[in-house]
Amino acid sequence: MSEQRRDPRLTPARADLAAESLRGIVDAPRYVAGEERRVVVPVAPLRREPYAGASLDTEALYGEAVTVFEDDAEGWSWVQLAADGYVGYMPTAALWTSGPAPTHRVKVGRTFLFPGPDIKLPPMDGLCFGSLVAVRRMDGRFAFTERGAIFAAHLEPLGAREADFVEVATRFLGVPYLWGGRSALGLDCSGLVQTALNACGLPCPRDSHQQEAALGASLPLDGPFQRGDLLFWPGHVAIVAAPDVLLHANAHHMMVAREPLGPALQRIADAGLPLRTAKRLALSA
């Protein structure tokens, strides 16, 4: 793997340290196998540098697995996400080292984690769509997890799959735009696409340019487009929700919004970003 081809966002290698799996591929003075941990907060930031003001590259949700290669003395861990391979720095306090493997995921936008099976108890946390939990037993309407009780109807087994990624994306309408976000608290354009496709069991890269390269078959830029097509601009991706409707997390509305396709294409082009690529997924056929 050459220095030119290595993507630091996906390659666990620094000047002083690299993953054991990269021995013989990249040069480093020290190699570490890493330790698997899981996220124990509702949403954990993955930052480019180990400080709170650093750029937010992406996020990991409660229960998601990460490989930790180093914990520093300032409370940051250098990690790689299991879900999409992203590498960066995460607060060490957001991670745990043990616990049962997840059995279920949250299937609604947000739900509460209670200390017991009683909705009058003060919630301990709020978990977002896609969070992973280990259900130990059912008690009436509640599922008991490794940390508390969740309304059982808000969960689904890990093997469950959504049938329609556009419908999943539509559930996020009105969620604020957040650069690097991928939760029901805030997400960006590619985070919305990744979350919706992952819910249908379709692997999806994290960033829009990666999605542009990896997903679907190319279409003429003048259409016609159909529901489920993906449209790409430099640094942006949107979903065609209907032949004349665009659905996307965007900085113009600062939220996930639905808008007429034609005027949206013109507005973005007028900002100096003409449509670059259109893709059609087999899932949407």
Image (cartoon, rainbow, N blue to C red):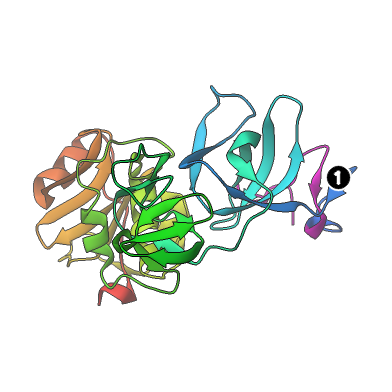
The residue drawn where x is 12% and y is 51% is: 261
Q: Is residue 215 visible?
A: no
The x and y percentages for residue 100 are 61, 61
Picture quadrant of residue 215: bottom left
Residue 12 on the magenta span: yes
Residue 147, position as x, y percentages in the image = 51, 49
From the image, give the main secondary structure of the stretch colored magenta: loop
* Quarter location, residue 179: top left
| Residue to which mark 1 is pinned | 28
Question: Which residue is farthest right?
Answer: 29
Q: Label 1, secondary structure: give it.
A: loop
Instruction: Give, as a single range, the part of the protein colored magenta.
Output: 1-21
Residue 232 x, y percent position in the rendering = 32, 52
Q: Is residue 35 above or below residue 282?
A: above
Q: Quadrant of the N terminus?
A: bottom right
Q: State which quarter of the image contains the C terminus.
A: bottom left
Residue 79 seen from this side: yes
Along the line of sight, the residue nearer the viewer: 120 or 200: 120
Residue type, label 1: Ala
Residue drawn at the location 33% of the way across and 51% of the way down: 192
Q: Residue at x 44, y 53 (%)?
A: 131
Residue 225, x across and y down, in percent: 17, 65
